[in-house]
Image: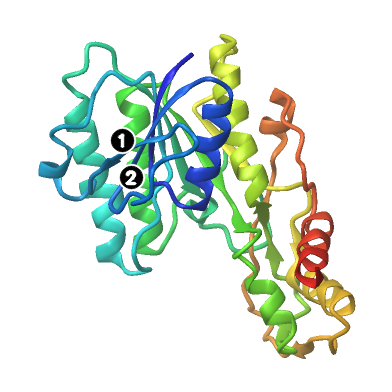
Amino acid sequence: MAKILIIGCGSIGTQLAELLTAKGHQVVGLKRNPPVSEDTIGIAYFKGDISASETLKALPIDFDFVYFIVSPDGRNQESYEAIYKVGVNNLLAHFSNAETTPQWFFVSSTSVYGQTQGEWVDENSISCPENATSQLIRLAEQRLIALNVDHVIVRFSGIYGPEREYLLRMARQVPAIQQDPPYYTNRIHQTDCVGVLVFLLECRLAKIVLESCYLASDDDPAPTWEVMSWLAERLACSLPSIKAMGQDAEMNKRCNNQRLKALGYQFNYPSFKEGYAKLITDSLL
């Protein structure tokens, strides 16, 4: 049994906590506003804000593992600095006095890749994002790995699932979508986000050597036009209109998940079709 801290208990962090608790681990969830109701699933909550170091003073330091699954309050640089610069610095300073440094699973994003020409990217690809928010995420990654090569970075692509149904809402609005050149979209179902995080912990506990970084995205980085057209047909909506693009139109990257699959992870939803088919079915119940 391991003692685990989950920093950021949103939907993914809470589901992860429930699974790990059911497996017999001791789980503490760090949250700015913990649930008021009495905990019924064995999760102990600690009220704290990682951007305010004084709120972390009473946080224990004897954890075996730390999951960092924090979402910024906004998409602006200030919000990202509060999490990925100030917050990470506060946490590392707090745990610097621990007798044994806990191993981190740091949830990052495929936005750290700056490629725009439809290239395939993997963990060995250059990650030099142009926008300031993604640069802050990348700097946090680099700091963690520089401190301890046993820390693990997990780069999620676009997360979808219950209450993350942006593309379904978009499909119903008959959007204009770029068709040629194709603009690729990469995604991972929320269930697989949790599954990957549990899987990597179990590998670590089984003494399996882990790489310092894993790209977590499903098997099918499909063009947005293909995805939206498929959703429109399933929803009995009008097909999207074609968005006219110039010859210099940028394309997205395509995420390669082979390192994670070679380790043994099997996706619950290997493509958008399986994942969105269930979302559509559930929405009709």
Q: Is residue 123 visible?
A: no
Give the residue at the far left of this rendering. 54
Residue 132 location (% of width, % of height): 34, 62
Rendered residue at 64%/58% (across/down):
253
Left-right relation of 36 to 194 = left
Report the residue marked by disc 2. Answer: 139
Residue 143 is tagged as: 1
Q: Residues within 10 Å of mark 1 (few under 14, many from 20)?
A: some
Give the SS element for disc 1.
helix
Q: Residue placed at 20% from the left, 48% from the top?
A: 86
Left or right of residue 13: residue 232: right
Q: Nearer the viewer, residue 152 or 17?
A: 17
Quarter of the figure with the C terminus? bottom right
Q: Position of residue 156 (x, y in %)?
A: 56, 48
- Let me know if residue 161 appears in the view: yes
Category of crowding for the residue at label 2, using alpha-carbon neighbours closer than 10 angstroms: few (below 14), some (14–19), many (at least 20): few
As shown in the figure, which amino acid type bears the numbered disc 2?
A: Leu
Q: Can you give x and y, in whole percent of width and height, for residue 59 in the image? A: 21, 31
Residues under numbered marks 2 and 1 in contact, where contact means CB atoms less than 8 Å apart: yes
